[in-house]
Amino acid sequence: MTFDSPKNDRIHELRQLFKEAFGDSDDFLDVFFGKAFSHDRCRCATENGRIVAALYWFDCVCNGRKAAYLYAVATSEAYRRRGIGKALLDNTHDFLASQGYSLALLVPGSESLFGYYERAGYAICGYVSEFICNASSERIDLRRIGAGEYAALRRKLLPENSVIQEGVSLEFLSELAELYAGDGFVLACVRNGEAASGIELLGDKSLAPSILNTLGLKSGRFRIHNGKKPFAMFRPLEESVTPPAYLGLAFD
């Protein structure tokens, strides 16, 4: 078993593994590998010349320290329950530390995975809450914005000790979701027919019903920081790392 970053000719294998593990469409994979992927931000486990596990990360910052948000951690089904995923994580942690990263972050894909990542050295570092509401009869000033403006406005609304996710992270997000801003809030959401699925609402949550009406939608589910639902986890890669209070963009 070897661990390393992939070469240019391995993209097809990575796409196959991604699709096997998560069932994403070719359109999504085109966006991810076209906009977000970098060989320098990927680690693979290879056995007998075949990629059997992989993970990716996005660069971010927390309290001025370099952080990696790990994404799409996957092992091929035929190679699971052999400790390969854990070995890949361990290798990635060592590699990240050697590259000057202070902490690793991730968002487990299901409730059952929190225990798995705890055994890999992670601890819960962020809680969120979600709520569903219907559109009101009121409209508000609302405008569609790009990744750069979203980043600038988002910084003003993030709680203290948050993870700053910008650059490639927000460029990728802007391909997956619609980004909006208004007086006192920013919103990243995906339309599902006449409903909205909110990836992140920062700011005044009481405006959610009016936001829906302005967007011409009937209902929506919104995710906000704070709450009781465990969301993100972190693992320090050096000493004296403070747990982040909020990692909001999970690209889920």
Image (spheres, rainbow, N blue to C red):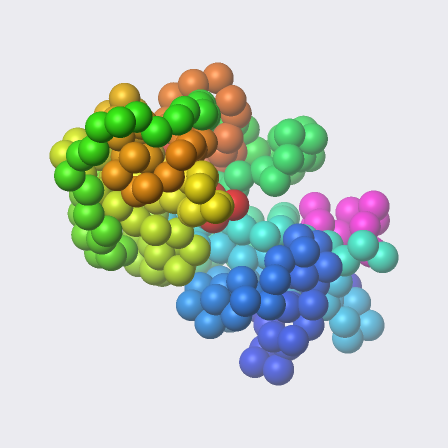
Q: How many marks?
A: 0
**Residue 146: percent from the left, percent from the top?**
24, 56
In the image: residue 187, left or right of residue 95: left
Give the residue drawn at x 71%, y 50%: 85
Q: Is residue 63 above or below residue 207?
A: below
Quarter where residue 63 is shown = top left
The residue lying toward the viewer, choosing from 102 and 173, is: 173
Which residue extends farthest front?
A: 137
The residue lying toward the viewer, choosing from 213 and 81, is: 213
User: Is-magenta flag for residue 120?
Assistant: no
Give the residue drawn at x 41%, y 24%: 133
Quadrant location of the N terminus in the rendered image: bottom right
Which residue extends farthest bottom?
A: 9
Give the residue drawn at x 70%, y 46%: 86
Q: Is residue 101 above or below residue 47?
A: above
Quarter where residue 208 is shown = top left
The majority secondary structure of the magenta stretch comes to: helix
